[in-house]
Image (spheres, rainbow, N blue to C red):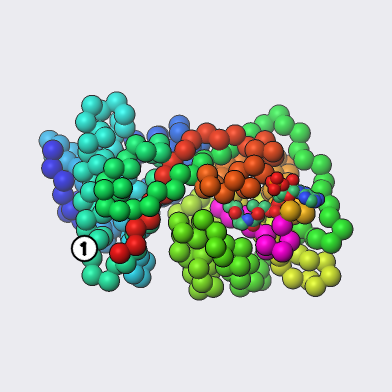
């Protein structure tokens, strides 16, 4: 087995592995990975995707890639064919990650590395990260079954109006996100939350790029203070499969919390998705964010998987 630079290969070499990965994401996460796979293949053909491929008998059977975002490196993905069934799959995963981590840590100007490995069980690939001084944050992948369940009744609030997300919410939403995550564990995991410019970049990634599903404006909502007519919270939802939604963001300004606005936002999204025939809604949440986890449990979400987020600051 050899580990080689991903940029030596083309989409023809990588496509069979990505087809395996697409099947794995569908089975594990009810997630259609085709959009992401096509984007990866375009970058591979352009020879601009940094990463590594595991090769045996001339075939790619594992890969990991990363991206540079200013002074930050983000591990994009890790996949080895047949996952657990291959006897040395774990060893190959560790080798690929070790190469990625070393490359990023040695890249001039890179002071931070983030990784979220949604398709890997918590702890399963932690060793190369922990050995290099990364912090580990367990996160939950939770799902709500929308089939057969009754749609939540219309919930209203005397002071708050819930209305559909629109383009004009962009700039104020970035301010809400920055304020909502001040001092929050998720701001340790994703440093985009630290600044207004970073939160705008986060929004841009969610709304305009198909990396995390396809943004679904219809099931995304804004919470408005009726009196002041300001945005005070929001929920953003993407379509990750024809019939599956995924909450990519939900937050409420600190001074408005504990009044049922989070629940109201979630109900608006759920109701919209049920009306449109969606069968499932998923989300990810940091285990240490216990208030949010409790809220999701109360709303009927079940924890399906635990995965890890890793952060390194050099
Ligand atoms: C998670 C978050 C969106 C929840 O929003 P919220 O508006 O506070 O949510 P709710 O008010 O509906 O529910 C929160 C609590 O208020 C309570 N509550 C609900 N309705 C209430 C009401 N009418 N009056 C008083 N309390 C109420 C709920 O029982 C719940 O109690 P809990 O603390 O035991 O869970 C909010 O805390 C937030 O923005 N956090 C920071 C960002 C974040 O963590 N986002 C989630 C990432 S996955």
Q: Is residue 113 visible?
A: yes
Q: Quadrant of the C terminus?
A: bottom left
Q: Residue, x 47% and y 65% (percent of image)? A: 192
**Residue 190: image x %, image y %?**
46, 59
Q: Is residue 167 visible?
A: no
Q: Residue, x 16% and y 41% (percent of image)? A: 55
For residue 252: magenta? yes
**Tag 1 residue:** 106
Mark 1 close to ligand 1, CB under 8 Å: no
**Residue 295: image x %, image y %?**
67, 44
Q: Residue, x 31% and y 56% (percent of image)? A: 66
> Looking at the rendering, which quadrant does residue 47 occupy?
bottom left
* Residue 191 vs residue 43, the one in the foreground: 191
Find the residue positioned furthest to the right. Answer: 158
In magenta, the rendered stretch is: 248-257
**Residue 162: image x %, image y %?**
76, 58
Q: Quadrant of the N terminus?
A: top left
> In this rendering, is residue 66 above or below 291?
below
* Residue 188 vs residue 27, the one in the foreground: 188
């Amino acid at each position: 087995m050899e580990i080689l630079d991903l940029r030596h290969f083309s989409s023809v070499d990588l496509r069979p592995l990505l087809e395996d990965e697409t099947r794995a994401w569908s089975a594990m996460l009810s997630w259609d990975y085709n959009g992401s796979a096509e984007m990866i293949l375009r970058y591979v053909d352009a020879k601009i995707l940094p990463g590594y491929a595991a090769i045996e008998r001339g075939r790619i059977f594992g890969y990991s890639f990363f991206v540079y975002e200013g002074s930050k490196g983000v591990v994009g993905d890790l996949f080895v064919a047949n996952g657990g069934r291959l006897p040395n799959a774990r060893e190959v995963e560790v080798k690929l990650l070790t190469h990625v981590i070393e490359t990023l840590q040695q890249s001039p100007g890179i002071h931070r590395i983030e990784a979220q490995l949604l398709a890997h069980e918590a702890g399963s690939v932690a060793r190369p990260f922990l050995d290099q001084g990364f912090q580990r944050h367990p996160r939950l992948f939770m799902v709500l079954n929308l089939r057969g369940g009754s749609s939540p009744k219309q919930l209203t609030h005397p002071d708050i109006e819930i209305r559909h997300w629109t383009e004009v919410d962009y700039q104020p939403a970035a301010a809400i996100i920055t304020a909502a995550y001040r001092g929050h564990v998720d701001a340790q995991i994703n440093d985009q939350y630290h600044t207004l410019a970073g939160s705008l970049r986060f929004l841009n990634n969610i709304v305009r790029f198909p990396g995390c599903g396809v943004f679904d404006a219809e099931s995304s909502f804004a919470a408005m203070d009726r009196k002041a007519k300001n945005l005070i919270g929001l929920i953003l939802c993407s379509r990750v499969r024809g019939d599956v939604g995924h909450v990519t963001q939900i937050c409420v300004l600190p001074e408005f919390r504990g009044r049922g606005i989070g629940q109201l936002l979630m109900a608006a999204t759920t109701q919209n998705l049920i009306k449109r025939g969606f069968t499932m809604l998923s989300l990810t949440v940091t285990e240490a964010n216990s208030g949010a986890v409790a809220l999701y449990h109360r709303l009927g979400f079940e924890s399906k998987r635990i995965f890890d987020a890793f952060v390194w600051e050099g």
